């Protein structure tokens, strides 16, 4: 059976052309900047590359840059002598004093340069050590490698994701030349289209940044908008970027993972004023209180400790009306670890929607003045290291959301898209709808093609990470990778089917 899908009902949006972004002032500034930077040779960043390899590359580059600087330094060394000689030829009594002070000046300059050089060398070494020891150390702010040693052109793949320049700065510093597939797939939908995301990807695929960067992007966007609106219209900044309120709650099944995620996000948020804190079992009450007193925007925690604090009325954790992101990381493990009860309790206390919207419009009696942030719904991201979220998990989430509020069902029960490995399929020219059936799975799956014009042009569908978010949605998540059959129907009634047996599921992406 073929199903017709109302595209409008799913809110497919035509994304902003990337070219426009590349032409933006900021990007051209970045490009100008990058031109000034020296290109280093033989470095090729591959998405999801081992971090160790990246680290080596960073050191390699840093070393060659240091060598260049050394040479420059040697050249410069001669200059003070020459200068001194010229002074001496002119020689009069006054010059002696002048020469002496210049001598001192030159010596201290030399010393300073030497110091800087050693510092830089140490920094580069440290960076390698840090990168090698994975993200655990990233957040400690030790990745101090000089930004200038990177060639921004090598990070071109990131520009398409239109991330804030402060985020990009961290990406350069971390040396991540390419976004991983899951990052490439999730960031546009989550950061720019405000969509909920369900992601399934194997361990080490870069899930943390797949949900972390959209969070940072939105918070930075809001802050910028707040400043702009204040400058232009004198509007209250609070209206666009609330301060001191919890904006993102990230829940992980284990303490280690919470610390790892928190460290990773801290490393990326390093140049921003966005604060990330971990709240995990085993942490002293004093430390916990101190961390929460700072009213961080992002809290990463384990369900047990978070619920303990929330049920105890911890102020920062119960003022959830401005919560814009709710993230379940490694959601399936959360169930395995017996955290379901606590997790459900946390979900239960999430406001149905941002109550600040209501209170604000009540106060202002003017809903037109509602800010962007207030109008935007809370986004839910559910990530899993394994490919499948078990039917049991989905059922449980569904039950919990039905019992409590609608917002959770917005996020989790409408898991509507699943990305699989890049596949090129050819269909009749005017194909309009596709129906995808799992051959072995218990569920039905479907795809809607929204970019018909594109289809007509290319006469093929590319299930590609770049395009999936606006082109297709597929239900649901698979327990294994069975073969699937894609049936198509074209506008003139022509139909047929294509079977895919080599399907490789990389991740899932949700659209509503
Ligand atoms: N775009 C990228 N390029 C290179 N390395 C990256 C990139 N994104 C993340 N990494 C690195 O890859 C490693 C794994 O990332 P992350 O922890 O997000 O993966 P994960 O899928 O959440 O894995 P896990 O299930 O172990 O938590 C980290 O060391 C991180 O620093």
Image (tube, rainbow, N blue to C red):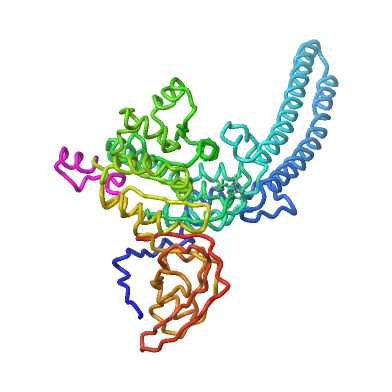
Establish if 137 lies above or below 41: above
> What is the x, y in percent for residue 341?
36, 42
**Residue at the image point whose x is 53% and y is 48% from the top:** 29
The total of numbered circles placed on residues is 0
Nearest the eye: 52 or 255? 255
Nearest the eye: 336 or 75? 336
Q: Main secondary structure of the magenta part?
A: helix
Based on the picture, tell me whether residue 438 belongs to the magenta stretch.
Answer: no
Based on the picture, tell me whether residue 366 belongs to the magenta stretch.
Answer: yes
Answer with left or right where residue 309 lies relative to residue 276.
left
Nearest the eye: 154 or 113? 154
Q: From which residue to which does the magenta span run?
A: 356-376
Q: The C terminus appears in which quarter of the rendering?
A: bottom left
Corner quadrant of residue 307? top left
> What is the x, y in percent for residue 300?
45, 37
Q: The N terminus appears in which quarter of the rendering?
A: bottom left
> What is the x, y in percent for residue 182?
52, 56
**Residue at the image point whose x is 71% and y is 32% from the top:** 120
């Amino acid at each position: 059976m073929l199903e017709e899908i109302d595209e409008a009902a799913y809110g497919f949006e035509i994304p902003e052309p990337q070219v426009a972004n590349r032409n933006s002032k900021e990007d051209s500034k970045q490009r100008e900047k990058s031109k000034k930077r020296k290109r280093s040779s033989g470095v090729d960043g591959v998405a999801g590359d081992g971090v160790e390899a990246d680290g080596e590359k960073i050191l390699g580059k840093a070393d060659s840059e240091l060598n260049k600087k050394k040479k420059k330094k040697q050249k410069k060394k001669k200059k003070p002598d020459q200068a001194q000689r010229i002074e001496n030829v002119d020689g009069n009594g006054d010059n002696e004093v002048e020469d002496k002070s210049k001598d001192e000046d030159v010596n201290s300059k030399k010393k300073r340069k030497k110091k800087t050089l050693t510092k830089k060398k140490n920094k580069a070494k440290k960076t390698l050590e840090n990168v090698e020891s994975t993200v655990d150390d990233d957040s400690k702010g030790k990745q101090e490698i000089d930004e200038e040693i990177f060639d921004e052109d090598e990070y071109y793949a990131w520009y398409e994701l239109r991330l804030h320049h402060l985020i990009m700065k961290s990406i350069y510093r971390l040396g991540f030349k390419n976004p991983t597939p899951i990052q490439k797939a999730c960031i546009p939908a989550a950061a720019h289209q405000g969509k909920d995301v369900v992601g399934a990807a194997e361990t080490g695929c870069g899930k943390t940044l797949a949900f972390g960067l959209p969070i940072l992007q939105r918070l930075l966007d809001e802050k910028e908008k707040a400043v702009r609106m204040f400058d232009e219209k004198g509007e209250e900044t609070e209206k666009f970027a609330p301060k001191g309120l919890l904006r993102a709650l990230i829940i992980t099944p284990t303490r280690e993972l919470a610390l790892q995620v928190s460290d990773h996000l801290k490393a990326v948020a390093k140049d921003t004023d966005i604060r990330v804190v971990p709240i995990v079992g085993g942490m002293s009450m004093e430390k916990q209180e101190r961390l929460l007193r700072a009213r961080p925007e992002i809290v990463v925690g384990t369900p047990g400790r978070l619920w303990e604090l929330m049920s105890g009325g911890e102020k920062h954790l119960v003022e959830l009306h401005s919560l814009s992101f709710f993230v379940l990381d490694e959601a399936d493990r959360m169930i395995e670890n017996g955290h379901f009860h606590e997790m459900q309790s946390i979900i239960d206390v999430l406001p149905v929607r941002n109550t600040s919207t209501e209170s604000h419009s009540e106060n202002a009696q003017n809903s037109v003045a509602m800010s962007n942030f207030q109008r935007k719904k809370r986004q839910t991201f559910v990530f899993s290291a394994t490919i499948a979220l078990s039917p049991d998990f989905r059922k449980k989430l569904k039950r919990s959301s039905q019992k409590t509020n609608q917002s959770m069902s917005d996020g989790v029960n409408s898991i509507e898209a699943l990305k699989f490995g890049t596949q090129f399929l050819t269909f009749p020219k005017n194909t309009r709808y596709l129906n995808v059936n799992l051959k072995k799975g218990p569920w039905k799956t479907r795809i809607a093609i929204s970019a018909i014009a594109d289809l007509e042009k290319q006469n093929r569908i590319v299930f590609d990470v770049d395009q999936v978010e606006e082109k297709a949605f597929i239900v649901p998540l698979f327990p294994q990778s069975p073969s699937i059959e894609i049936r198509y129907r074209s506008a003139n009634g022509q139909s047929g089917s294509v079977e895919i047996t080599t399907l490789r599921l990389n991740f899932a992406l949700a659209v509503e």
